[in-house]
Image: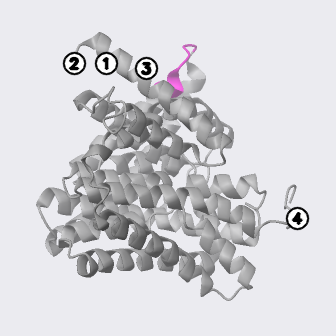
Amino acid sequence: MEAHVFFLHLMLMLLAARLFGELAVRLGAPSVLGELMAGVVVGPSLLGWIAVDDVIKLLAEIGIILLLFEVGLETDVGKLLKSGKRSAFVALMGFFLPFLFGFALAFWGFGLELLVSLFVGGTLTATSIGITIRALTDLKRHNSLEGQVVLGAAVLDDVMGVVLLALLYEFSIGGGVNLTNAGKVTLFVVVFFLIAPSMAKLISLAIHKAHHATDIPGLIPTTIVSLVLFFAWLAHAMGVPALLGGFAAGLALSRFFFLPFGIALKTDPKFAHEIEGQMRPIVHLFTPIFFVTVGLSLNMREIDWTSPFIWQFSLGMLVLAVAGKILGALLLREDWATRWRIGVAMVPRGEVGLIFAELGRTSNIFSNEIYAGMLLVVAFTTLVAPLGLKLLYRGEPDLAGR
């Protein structure tokens, strides 16, 4: 592709992402769904203006890494500790039940291959922290009991999801499920998350000192992006997905992070806020490229919409995706209203589910029909959860100011 054509395509992707994202928000849906739809509209499914090439794939890869960096940056491990056993129970049930349900239906119900079924189950495990936080904050319930339980559970969900993602990544490049490789990857993930955040925290101290010593603007975004990319390379070198490097770097630079074994370095909350403020525009520039690329990668014209499989598969997975999250919350020893609110708040898959689905597609694990079915499940759960929470909190006083 010639440079001027690529510039035009990139312009169309960014503007379409913004336009459809704004439209989605005005309709009461998360912006991520609008960005996904932007890719469907300008891609081969409808207008056919843009096709995914190697350059777009690289930009989307950067978008995934920075997206996981932002997730790590906003991860509050303290919330998990405060909400304690309830968060752990909701997270474990909300992780394993959808995984087992999705795997069982795919493997035994639809006769899909083992690796495909594992990817299907993995996609159903995710809970989108960003969409959950946005929905609860809009309702002014993020400081409620259920808000704290959900946020703590979502943090633990992310950690478990990251490990599962690393395992599925290894299976995809290794050509199948291998217990030896699974053990190796699990060990690498543990070692990586013990070493990388500590390294990132030490490097951030050097960046902090350099920030006060320089008169040249732009030090923070330059050095932090370099740090994220370095840890993405380090993650790949250790045999785990590169995007986990972004998550580890964000976790280390988070205002809420503490080092393992109780060893803590002095953290400057003001500097941490400054990092967040200067990195956010860069993250918001690249992450829409990833979501648009997800939509571009789906060619709806190649799907046989008259086939019963696509509808049976999507509907079956959707029911299990919702039930798997809600069931764990219903087993809590709380009043029924609280249980239902916690369960519904755990339903949205959002950007995390899209990452799983996209890995399945790029690894040639998902066919176009299965990929489309998983995108429908991710989209519907992302849309229905905020709407469901609004109904469940209707008539309740908010907790603003508490």
Residue 187 shows in this picture: no
Q: Earlier in the sequence, mark 3 or mark 1?
A: 1
Q: CA distance from mark 2 to mark 3?
A: 15 Å
Q: Which mark is residue 6?
A: 1
| Label 2 close to label 3 by CB (< 8 Å) | no
Quadrant housing residue 377: bottom left
Query: What kind of residue is marked 2?
Result: Met
Q: Is residue 33 magenta?
A: no
Q: Which mark is residue 11?
A: 3
Q: Nearer the viewer, residue 207 or 317?
A: 317
Q: Which mark is residue 397?
A: 4
Q: Can you say which quadrant of the picture contains the C terminus?
A: bottom right
Q: Earlier in the sequence, mark 2 or mark 1?
A: 2
Circle 4 residues within 10 Å: few <14, some 14–19, many ≥20: few
Disc 2 target residue: 1
Magenta-highlighted residues: 215-222
Q: CA distance from mark 4 to mark 2?
A: 56 Å
Q: Secondary structure at mark 4?
A: loop
Task: Point out the residue furthest to the top here.
Answer: 4
Query: What kind of residue is marked 4?
Result: Pro
